[in-house]
Every structure is written in structure tokens, then in C-alpha cells.
């Protein structure tokens, strides 16, 4: 089976930073032909760009891991530009706030998030991009996934949410421990086979 993976850190290949470890995307790649374009910390806009960068007709199934509506797209991240896993990250408040404790140059960005960032506009823009992604993938076998609380975001058909695993299975690879990654892998494998075989 030829599988395309696009999305954020939940779907990225964390072995670029942690060789010898294994997340659910690596488990899938052992059984199928996988092209993984997911990038840790990226915005929904960059996920859309990932999908636009390839010929979708070459894949039997597509997995898209959706991200927070509060990420702001940037060309170069002020903290993670040299990190092998997060080098294509976009801005999100919690990350910038944490790093501003040791890097005072980030304080103006913190001030922007705290005093000027329009969350309703961010949600609206996120929804528009999700609709574009949904329209783009309408004729392809697609599984939409997230590891975030997704209740108030755009509703994709056949979306799987793994946020419930955070409480019991938080860990190093793709945000989950071995048991969490195994569960994600098994659920996705079953869903992929069902879609592939009709």
C-alpha cells in the first residue's frame, strides 16, 4: 500500500532527532510504502502546502494530521530553526512563552500573543484552510487525524481523534509512549485496510 502522511508533530518522523526510537509512522513504514511529509510544529497552512507539493494520485491512502488553529505561519522560527525535528515549526504561544524565560528577544512575540492576537480570526482562517484541504482530498482515500481536542474545529468526515491517549500514554515519540504509539498504529492499520479493500 502506498501511503502519504502529511501534518504536524503527531505524524512527523521523530527518528530525525531520536534515532533508534519508533513512533506509529515508523511502524506503518515497516509494512507499507510511506512518504512522510509531516513536520513538527507546523501550521495548518503548511499542512496544506505539504499536500499541494506532491501528486496525490500516486497514493492509495492519505493520512492528514491536523494542528492547532492558534499556530502562526513563519518562514523561520526564532527558536527551532536549527532543530532537526522542529526546524519548520510555526509560532504558538505556549512554546514562545516557555522559551522567553531564557531568551528575552522573544518577549515582543509573547506580548503580541497576550495583547493583540485575535483568536477568533485564527479559528476562522484555520477553518477556511481545513475546508480547502477537505475539498482537495474529496476524491482520495483519506483519514483525518488529530491528537488535540477538536470539538470546536472544522468537522472532517472519517476523522479519528487520539487526544484521549494523552491522559494515559504520553511519551517521547509522536507525543506518546510505546503503548500509545502501538494503539495509534493498530487503529490506523485497521482503518487503512478497510479503506484500501473497500
Image (cartoon, grey):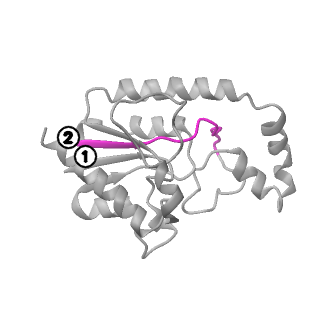
Q: Is residue 65 above or below residue 82?
A: above
Query: Magenta segment: does it hold 65?
Result: yes
Q: How many C-alpha atoms fall within 10 Å of the one at disc 1: few (<14), some, or many (≥20)?
A: some
Q: Is residue 59 above or below residue 171?
A: above
Q: Which mark is residue 195?
A: 2
Q: Residue furthest left?
A: 197
| Extent of the magenta region | 59-75
Residues marked 2 and 1 touching at CB (< 8 Å):
yes
Q: Residue at x 44, y 41 (%)?
A: 50
In this picture, residue 50 sits left or right of residue 193: right
Which SS class for mark 1? Answer: helix
Q: Which mark is residue 170?
A: none
| Residue 141 on image: x %, y % | 25, 36
Return the residue nearer the eye: 16 or 25: 25
In this picture, residue 144 sits left or right of residue 58: right
Which residue position is annotated with label 1? 191
| Residue 101 on image: x %, y % | 83, 59
From the image, give the main secondary structure of the stretch colored magenta: loop
Amino acid at each position: 500500500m502506498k501511503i502519504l502522511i502529511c501534518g504536524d508533530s503527531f505524524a512527523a518522523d521523530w527518528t530525525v532527532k531520536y534515532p533508534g526510537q519508533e513512533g506509529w509512522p515508523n511502524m506503518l513504514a515497516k509494512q507499507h510504502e510511506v512518504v512522510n511529509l509531516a513536520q513538527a510544529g507546523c501550521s495548518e497552512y503548511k499542512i496544506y502546502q505539504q499536500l499541494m507539493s506532491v501528486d496525490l494520485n500516486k497514493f492509495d491512502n492519505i493520512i492528514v494530521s491536523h494542528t492547532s488553529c492558534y499556530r502562526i505561519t513563519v518562514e523561520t522560527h526564532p527558536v527551532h530553526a536549527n532543530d532537526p525535528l522542529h526546524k519548520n515549526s510555526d509560532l504558538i504561544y505556549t512554546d514562545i512563552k516557555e522559551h522567553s524565560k531564557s531568551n528575552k528577544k522573544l518577549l515582543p512575540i509573547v506580548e503580541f500573543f497576550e495583547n493583540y492576537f485575535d483568536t477568533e480570526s485564527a479559528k476562522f482562517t484555520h477553518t477556511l484552510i481545513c475546508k480547502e484541504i477537505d475539498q482537495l482530498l474529496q476524491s482520495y482515500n483519506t483519514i483525518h487525524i488529530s491528537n488535540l481536542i477538536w470539538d470546536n474545529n472544522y468537522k472532517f468526515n472519517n476523522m479519528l481523534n487520539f487526544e484521549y491517549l494523552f491522559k494515559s500514554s504520553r511519551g517521547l515519540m509522536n507525543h506518546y509512549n510505546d503503548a500509545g504509539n502501538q494503539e495509534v498504529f493498530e487503529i490506523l492499520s485497521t482503518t487503512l485496510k478497510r479503506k484500501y479493500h473497500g
